[in-house]
Amino acid sequence: MLQYEQVVPPEARDGAPLVVLLHGRGADRFDLLSLAPHLAPGAVVVTPQAPHSGTPWGYGPGWAWYRYLGGNTPEPQSFEQSQQALAEFLTALPGTLPIRTGPVVLGGFSQGGTMSVGYALRNPGAVPLALCLSGFLADHPTVRATPESVRGTRFFWGHGTMDPSIPFSMGEEGRAALRAAGAELETRDYPMGHGISPDEARDIRDWIARTLPAADAA
C-alpha cells in the first residue's frame, strides 16, 4: 500500500467526506498536507506518496507518479503502474481510517492532477468529485474522455495562465476534451505560474461545499 499521511479533524464523524490529494513531480506525501484545513472543513484528508523515486528520472530526491515524456504524454508503463497502485490504495484505505468516511474527492497538483483525472476517466463513477490543479489530460491508451467515462463524476480544473511547466494551453486542451464528452466541469484561471494560490484554495473549498450535496443526491 502507498505510504500516506492523514488529517482527521476532531469534529469528523462517520460519513465525513474523504479528500485524497496527490502531490506533483519530485514532491512527497507531506507536500499538500497544509491544504487540509482549507479545502473541506470536517473532511478526512489523506495524502499518499507516489510509488516511483524521482531521482533516476532527474526529478530530485522526491517521488513521481510517472516519467514524463513531454507534451501531454506520460511514459505508459510507469503511469499504468501508478494508476494500479492508486486503485489498490483507494480500495484499501477506508479500512485503515478511524471513522467510516463518505463521498470521495480525488485531486492533485501537476502530476497529481493528471493522475486524478486519469483515474476518474478509467473508473467511471468511482469518485464523485475530481480536482485537476495545473495538470493535463494524459495521452494514454486507458484514458479517454467519453460520455461513458465522465458519467458520475464532477470535475474542477484550475490552471495558471502563466504556467511555464504545464502551459495553460495544455490545460485548455484537457478541459475542451471533457466538455466535448459532456462532463460536468467547473474551471478557474489564475494569473500565476505553476502553483496553488490562496484564491484557488478558496475556490476549491467553495466548489466542494456546493457540489458534494449534489453528488450525494445523484
Image (spheres, rainbow, N blue to C red):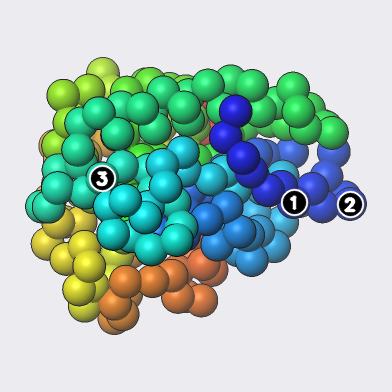
**Disc with the residue nearer the chain's start (3 vs 1):** 1
Q: Amino acid at mark 2?
A: Pro
Q: Nearer the viewer, mark 3 or mark 1?
A: 3
Q: Amino acid at mark 3?
A: Arg
Q: Which residue is mark 1?
A: 7
Q: Quadrant of residue 48?
A: top right
Q: Is residue 26 above or below residue 75?
A: below
Residue 167: percent from left, percent from top: 16, 66
Q: Is residue 15 left or right of residue 210?
A: right
Q: Quadrant of residue 83?
A: top left
Could you tell me which secondary element the residue under label 2 belongs to?
loop
Neighbor class of circle 2 (other Cα within 10 Å; few <14, some 14-19, many 20+) is few
- Tell me, yes or no, if residue 131 can be seen here: no
Q: Quadrant of residue 25?
A: bottom left
The residue lying toward the viewer, choosing from 61 and 191, is 61
Instruction: Give me the residue at 31% from left, 80% from top.
Output: 192
Q: Which residue is mark 3?
A: 67
- Tell me, yes or no, if residue 54 can be seen here: yes
Q: Is residue 41 left or right of residue 11?
A: left
Neighbor class of circle 3 (other Cα within 10 Å; few <14, some 14-19, many 20+) is many
Instruction: Give me the residue at 53% from left, 21% from top.
Output: 88
Q: Is residue 33 above or below residue 145?
A: below
Q: Nearer the viewer, mark 2 or mark 1?
A: 1
Q: Is residue 192 above or below residue 189?
A: below
Q: Which residue is mark 2?
A: 10
Instruction: Give me the residue at 27% from left, 52% from top.
Output: 57
Q: Amino acid at mark 1?
A: Val
Q: Nearer the viewer, mark 2 or mark 3?
A: 3
Residue 55: percent from left, percent from top: 37, 55
